[in-house]
Amino acid sequence: MPAVDKLLLEEALQDSPQTRSLLSVFEEDAGTLTDYTNQLLQAMQRVYGAQNEMCLATQQLSKQLLAYEKQNFALGKGDEEVISTLHYFSKVVDELNILHSELAKQLADTMILPIIQFREKDLTEVSTLKDLFGLASNEHDLSMAKYSRLPKKRENEKLKTEVVKEVANARRKQHLSSLQYYCALNALQYRKRIAMMEPMLGYTQGQINFFKKGAEMFSKRMDSFLSSVSNMVQSIQGELDAEADAMRVSQQDLLSVNESVYTPDSDVTSPAINRNLIQKAGYLNLRNKTGLVTTTWDRLYFFTQGGNLMCQPRGAVAGGLIQDLDNCSVMAVDCEDRRYCFQITTPTGKSGITLQAESKKEYEEWICAINNISRQIYLTDNPEAVAIKLNQTALQAVTPITSFGKKHESLRPSQNVKNMEMVSDRIIPKELSTKPDCTELIAPGTPIQFDMVLPATEFLDQNRGGRRTNPFGESEDSKNDEEDSLLQQMFVVRFLGSMAVQSDDTNEVIYEAMRQVLAARAIHNIFRTTESHLMVTTKSLRLIDPQTQVTRTTFELASVTQFAAHQDNKRLLGFVVRVTESLGEEFMSANIFESNTEGEKICYAISLGKEIIEAQKDPEALAQLMMSMPLTNDGKFKLLNDHSEEDGAVPEERGEESEA
């Protein structure tokens, strides 16, 4: 026998759109089977009625033959032979009538009764379970909607307990009804085969018995065929019994799970979070704006496919594209007094969609999965291994290991040397030299600053570092410096962290700082960063608040001694600042950023600023440099690959907080 399609009982609790789509196929099959069964029953009842009519007709014929003797014919001579013959025919007809009566009874028991029982028992049971499943599903949706609306700020423990209990009861009820419904639909795939063949088997056997008793009209080959059909029915019945036992055992196992399976956010204190996901699927609440200030939340099924976030409403055959996740950022947000909300932001800075997860575990795994996908890990040969390797840096941060530069040099030595020559303002020989150990670059245990950019020296003394600025706006001196500067380039960056370093002789210190900052952010589960506008001029590097246009901090360009972009993640960059303290001691700090554009463009702008500083010492060199480089309309240097949409434009809808 060919395999029978089945609904997986293990997927009943998840209740995904794929399972619902498969369930609709089974329901459509059950509806078609019901219509066909009704039509088949009508045809069989017509045959049974004809057979009953045959019994009455033969009985009437037998009586009519016997009645010939009682007729008063005017000419009745020679009727004795006719009467005796008719008596014999009457006996034959009576014997045939007995056979027809037995056939009618056999058709009623073996043909009509099984199909009626199949319709009234199995098909009615499936229809009843379908209604119960629909009621339980609607009740679960209502309870989940009520749970999703639980307040975050004015949390009522009693109300929360009642709602959580209501959700668990509704989910348990839906799980039980779905399991019973799935079992009935699976069993129907076996029963419908029996229901179609068993009545016809009874009909055929009844006819054969009728003909055998009247005359040997059927050959043994037909008997063999009917025997094989009977064996087939018995085989299907045996498979049904075994499958029914297995489904009963599976149902008991699935219903004996821990109560936490039904309780949302049951492990809120210490959830087991997988941060190496490169794909994710599950239900989320999607915020939709219905007016200027009003919003609605829809519970939909989301899943990732490659670099895309897909959404599939319940009942839909396939999902649709919601958001392209490549180079997007994700961040946690506080939204309308709801918990576990996060927002996806496009690479251009435009705010994307806002989603709400069911639990803390789902909330953090969705953020980690989207963050991994935005790095385009899924395009690698072994994306799972790459995701695990990136997240293992959190464990490696406590011990000195090979820096980013060392790792990538073994893979691409020629390209690594080329990048080192391009991003640094110092002349580095092409031949490979022995790279310093990470302990020589950064002292073990050096603290890392994650909040808004301040000079790393403030870990030692709050009065050290860059010059102070007016907190209410720019001073006239700073504005005049900008106007007099021959170079002004604006970039959108996000501060990741800064730390004190022990050397600025090589850009390996920047790679090591990148590794330790990213690892520390993973250890402390830090997702949110501060966005700023980086202004590169011939005098300084200024970080400006995008909302108030107030300078947050300033680094003198002459104090920037080393700068580089990451070899693989082009949006990562860093620079080392050397500051002379009041006692004559020098202090160096590495500052790590993530940019909306390629970090090499920012490094090129810094390098150009240093070239302009050197050229300003010689008027002829400056004139030659200005002739070799394109200038803007106001006489300032312009980058060859500068595009206003990528570097200079200020995104209007970009929030202050974004995802690293």
Image: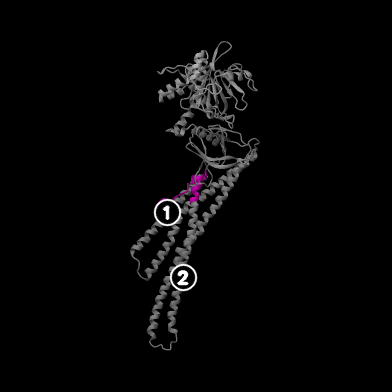
Residue shown at 53% from the left, 29% from the top: 646
Assess whether residue 415 is covered by the magenta stretch. Answer: no
Q: How many marks?
A: 2
Q: Report crowding for label 1: few under 14, some 14 to 19, many 20 or more residues within 10 A (C-alpha).
A: few
The answer, for residue 660, to whether it is visible in the render is no
Assess whether residue 17 is covered by the magenta stretch. Answer: yes
Name the amino acid, label 2.
Answer: Asn
Q: Quadrant of the C terminus?
A: top right
Residue closer to the observer: 626 or 358: 626
Q: Give the residues drawn in magenta, as a range.
A: 1-25
| Residue 347 drawn at (x, y percent) | 53, 32
| Residue 284 drawn at (x, y percent) | 55, 40
**Relative to 86, is 352 above or below?**
above
**Type of colouring:** one colour
Residue closer to the observer: 646 or 572: 646
Q: Earlier in the sequence, mark 2 or mark 1?
A: 2
Q: Name the residue under label 1.
A: 238
Q: Mark 2 points at which residue?
A: 52
Quadrant hosting residue 334 = top right
Q: Nearer the viewer, mark 2 or mark 1?
A: 2
Name the amino acid, label 1.
Answer: Gly
Callout 1: helix, strand or loop? helix
Callout 2: helix, strand or loop? helix
**Relative to 27, is 297 above or below?**
above
